[in-house]
Image (cartoon, rainbow, N blue to C red):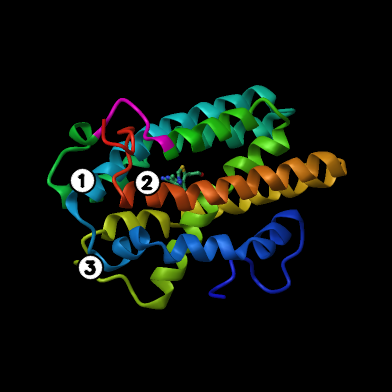
Amino acid sequence: MGVLPVAAGETGFTADLGRRHADLFEAFYQHPFLKGLREGSLAREQVLHYVGQDHQYLTAYVRCYGLGLALSPDREWMRFFHDGASVILGAESHAHEALCEYAGVSYEEAQVDHLAPSAQAYVDHMMAAGRDTLGVLLAALLPCPWTYLWAAARFTEEAPLAADHPFHGWWDFYAGRYETDKLAWTRSLLDRAAAEAGPAERERMERAFVASCHHEVRFWEMAWSLEDWTPPNGS
Ligand SMILES: Cc1ncc(C[n+]2csc(CCO)c2C)c(N)n1
């Protein structure tokens, strides 16, 4: 087992989730695509496939924040979804721009208008969680920031990020202060929702969280293998 996503002594619903499913965080970290992001060794077409798909994924993620806004019981929850949506719409392209520079294209040129199968499955899962309770929705949304920020902190703490690392801007974005604060806020809202939920809802929350952790790993695999809708028999 590698580095746990939860600090010793942390308690609460999300700390339990992080400990129970640390193997999925490790699978995320060890995936060859993320290894390629660490080592700066990805093929240009893999980077481009990732950026095109992730742009679509982020659009869907903002839509899920819209579902969260509609389910919000008070203004703190509304501020969470409103601010989060605005950061994704405004700033997350910075991370992608570093990847586009590596591939030698503009962000606009890298965009695609459809989702690959694994990206579509992840988006459908999050949207379906938005038809359940606020707690289930947030549980489905949590692995997205948690896996990325945990991986970025782990990688940048192992050794300082070289100024000439080809994906410097990408790592820098996810290792940044704003994102870390936002993750802590997400976890505390979900901890509170879980404390108020009954056992059946908490079970659905955990299932939604685990599915999203799997989808995060599969998203790397989609990008790594250049997955698209071509039938396996090639027709
Ligand atoms: C497949 C996929 N999963 C996670 C992220 C990372 N991410 C997306 S939105 C956001 C902010 C949420 O507060 C973060 C950290 C990504 N880019 N693509």
Q: Residue at x 53, y 75 (%)?
A: 2
Q: Main secondary structure of the magenta part?
A: loop
Q: Which residues are magenta?
A: 111-117
| Dot 1 or dot 3, earlier in sequence | 1
Does 13 sit left or right of 187 as displayed? right
Q: Position of residue 150 (x, y in %)?
A: 50, 62
Query: Can residue 203 be found in the magenta stretch?
Result: no
Label 1 amino acid?
Cys
The residue under the point 41% across, 77% down is 158
* Foreground tag (1 vs 3): 1
| Type of the residue with mark 2 | Met
* Horizontal and vertical percent position of residue 207: 69, 45
On the picture, is 139 further left or further right than 41?
right
Which residue carries the number 1 mark? 100
Verify whether residue 115 appears in magenta: yes
Residue 99: give x, y in percent of width and height: 24, 50
Front tag of 2 and 1: 2
Classify residue 90 by image quadrant.
top left
Badge 3 density bin: few <14, some 14–19, many ≥20, Cα 10 Å: few
Q: Which numbered disc, 2 or 1, marks the residue that appears first in the sequence?
A: 1
Tell me if residue 45 comes above or below residue 6 in the rendering.
Answer: above
Left or right: 231 as drawn, with respect to 204:
left
Residue 141 quadrant? top right
Residue furthest out toward the top = 70
- Residue under label 2: 222
Q: Are marks 2 and 1 in contact (CB under 8 Å)?
A: no
